[in-house]
Amino acid sequence: MPTYFSDRSFRFQRALARNNNRAWFHAHKDDYEQYLRQPFLRLISDLREPLAQISPHFRADPRPVGGSLFRIHRDTRFANDKTPYKSWASARLYHERIKTVDSGRGQDRRDTTTSLPWRGVAIDAPSFYLRIAPGGCLLGGGLWQPETAVLRRIRDFIVENPRSWTQLTRAPAFRRKYELIGSSLARPPRGYPPGHELIADLQRKSFAATRALADEVVTGPRLLKTVSDGLRGCAPLVDYLCAALELPF
């Protein structure tokens, strides 16, 4: 079975975290290409078939620019942290209905923190997400901090379909591997009864779940199968969100 990443991949990321400046990065750009960017693009390419088996409406796009892989450059315009590069690498396997803003660069600028902002661009649609970072590798799926109107549609759908939401998120097989993440409102959202049985879920600002990947799995020969299985395990959540937004799955 193929391998993609190695200890050299993590070594580059750790060194970048210590030397996050343009001079160092350009001096080590070959390492970035050889040990991180190109392996990630190969993985994305190899995920196309497994992802198509999960849903024909999601895309694993291995194009170097404008595809699934987020740029390593950070958008520092409104950030206190002005370091120019991300010390992690990440990719979004996106819904076919999602639209980019400007030749792929718009979607890249969304990935600005070590949290999981895989929100849609132009339209909000759920995505699958994969992150590679030493000690912080993970995969997941869902919607991260969607627009207010989209949040309302999801909340209304949960109110109308509470049993399927409960069966999905409380299933032992799901809870053993995945954790619903993100912050919540301090109070019930306007228009929803405080005593609703799923009020804690209705207060969520994001509807996304993740599971950790061990470093040794990421550098080993079973990464493709592990990621493929992980996407399949998270697919019911993504499917539910697609239904809420009347998107095909």
Image (cartoon, grey):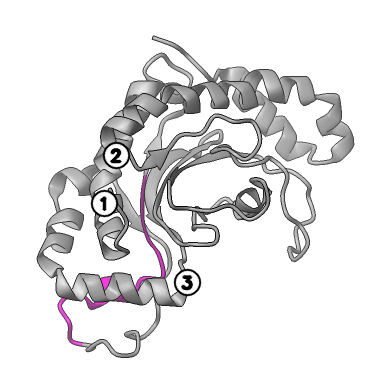
Q: Which residue is pictured at 42% across the width and 63% down the height?
A: 182
Is residue 200 in sight in this rendering? no
Give the CA separation, mark 1 to mark 2: 9 Å
- Percent position (x, y) of residue 235? 27, 44
- Percent position (x, y) of residue 8? 63, 19
Task: Please name the residue that numbered disc 1 is placed on.
Answer: 239
Tags 1 and 2 touching, CB below 8 Å = yes
Q: Is residue 165 left or right of residue 237?
A: left
Q: Which residue is pictured at 79% across the width and 55% down the height?
A: 82
Q: Which mark is residue 147?
A: 3
Query: Based on the displayed image, in which of its 4 quarters is residue 9 positioned?
Result: top right
Q: Secondary structure at mark 3?
A: loop
Give the CA separation, mark 1 to mark 3: 19 Å
Does the magenta run of residues contain 139? no
Q: Is residue 49 left or right of residue 159?
A: right
Q: Quick one: quadrant of the N terminus?
A: top left
Residue range corresponding to the magenta coloring: 195-210
Query: Based on the displayed image, in which of its 4 quarters is residue 93 positioned?
Result: top left
Comparing 197 with 51, the one in front is 51
Q: Is residue 23 left or right of residue 176?
A: right
Is residue 102 in sight in this rendering? yes
Task: Mark 2: give few (<14), some (14-19) or many (20+) Cα within 10 Å.
Answer: some
Question: Which of the two discs, 3 and 2, sits closer to the camera?
Answer: 2
Q: Which mark is residue 21?
A: none
Task: Please name the residue that numbered disc 2 is placed on.
Answer: 55
